[in-house]
Amino acid sequence: METNQNGCSPLRFRARKPAGGFCFVPVSCVLSAWGAMQSGEISLYCLRVWVACIEMVARRCCIEDGVEPSYSESEVLKLVGSGQACKVKKSLKRLQEAGLLEWSTKQIRVDVAHRPLAPWIEAKVKNVRRNIPVPRRMLRHMAGCRSRVMIATLLGHLVRCLYYRKGCCVSGGKCKASFVAQVFGVHVRGVKRARKALVEMGWLVPDRTSQQALNRWGMQVIIRVQRVSEGVEYQTNSPPRSDGERGESATPILYNKLSARSMNQKLRRAGGVEMGSGERKRVTLTRIRLDDLREPDRLDGLYRAAVASGVIRRNAASRLQWFAAAEHALAAGDRNPCGLFVTVYKRALWEYITQEQEDAARVKLKRLDYGEESSLRGGEVDLPPDYFAVAA
C-alpha cells in the first residue's frame, strides 16, 4: 500500500486479486451496454441480467478440461433476485437482439458488442479498450441492485479507479461525481448520495483532498478489493435531502425554497415510459410520432436518445435547437411534420427556425424543467439538474 506525502491516507492499493476473485470486463462493453439502456433498446432489468451473465461465466473459469458448462435461466433469476422466469427469458432475448450477449445452455459470451460509441464519450473516457478487473462481489451486488444511480456510480468508479498492471489489481484514482453524471446520464446529486452510501458500506475509501483538487479532478478514492460487505440495500434514485428538510424533497439548485402552492402537482411521466396497459408508446428515433413533437417530456426523451447515439451534442444550445426544430416542424410541416423534423436535425438546417419558434421552445423548456408556475424568464432556461456539470 502506498501513502500520500503526509503519510496519513493510502493513494494506491495493490493486490494480486480481490477477495472473492475477479473477472475482466472491457470498458467498451460496459459503455455499450449502458448506451443501449439509455437509448431504450434494453431496460435496467436487462442490464442487471447482463451483469449476472458475466458472473455466471466467471463462476466456471476453473472448470475441468473436457467438462461442458451448463447455464440456466433459474441461475440468472437467483442472481438478479427479482422478477420471474418469463421476464428473464425476455431480457435475454432483448440482450441478444441488441448484440450484447450470446446465450445458450452450453456457452455465454458477453464481449460480443462492437457498437460505435459517441465521440464525446470516447473523448471523456480515456482508453476505452482496456479491461477492468471487476471484483465478483461487486458483480453480484450490481446484478441484485435496483438502483440505476448506484450501478452507474459503481461503474464510473471502476472505470476511473481500478486497473490491472503487472499481474496485480491496482486500486486508487480520482473520480468526479459530474463525470459519472455526464457519462452515464444520471443526477449528479444522486451520484454523491450513492458514493456516500458506498463509503459507508466499505466499498470506497476516500482520501484527504484539497478543495482545489476536488474541483478540478474529483475525490481521491480507493476501491476496497480485499474485504467488502454484501447485502446492503440501496434502492432510492431521489436526490439527497438536506439535514433541515427531512420531510421535503431536495431543494433545487437555483432556489433554496420550494413553492408552497398546490397547483400543478400532478406527477410527470418521463419520456419513453410505458403507462397503464401499454397505451403510451416508447419514444424512439427510428419511429417519431406526432405526439413526440407536441409533448415536451416525450420530445426530451427523444433528445436524450439522440445524445446517447451521438446524433447531437449534449449542451444547452443543442437542446434548445432540438425543441425549436420541433416547433418549426409543427408550424411548417403541413403534410409530414415528423419527416420535416428529422430533416432539420439530420442536415443541421437550424437557420430555418424563426425567432418566434425559438421563443416558444424556450418557454416549453422552462415549463418542463421548472414547472408551470416558475418565475424564471425564458432566457434563463438551461439544462435540467441532471445535465449540470458541477464540481465533485
Image (tube, helix red, strand yellow):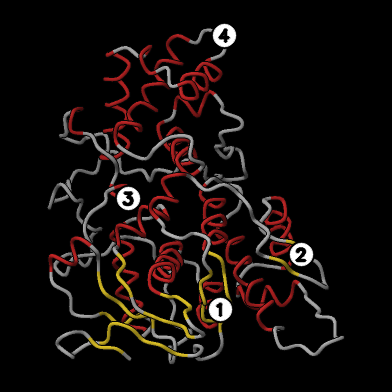
Q: Which residue is mark 1?
A: 140
Disc 4 designates what residue?
335
Amino acid under disc 3: Asp
Say above or below: 314 vs 162.
above
The residue under label 3 is 386
Please state which of the two labelled residues, at mark 2 or mark 4, is closer to the viewer: 2
Toward the right, the furthest residue is 66
Q: Which mark is residue 24?
A: none
Residue located at (30% from left, 20% from top): 360
Say few, some or many: other residues with alpha carbon within 10 Å of mark 2 (under 14 / 14 to 19 / 20 or more).
some
Q: Nearer the viewer, residue 216 or 88?
A: 216
Compare marks 1 and 3 and give the one earlier in the sequence: 1
Q: Secondary structure at mark 4?
A: loop
The x and y percentages for residue 299 are: 44, 32
- Residue 201 versus residue 56: which sits nearer the camera? 56
Q: Residue at x 38, y 11 (%)?
A: 352
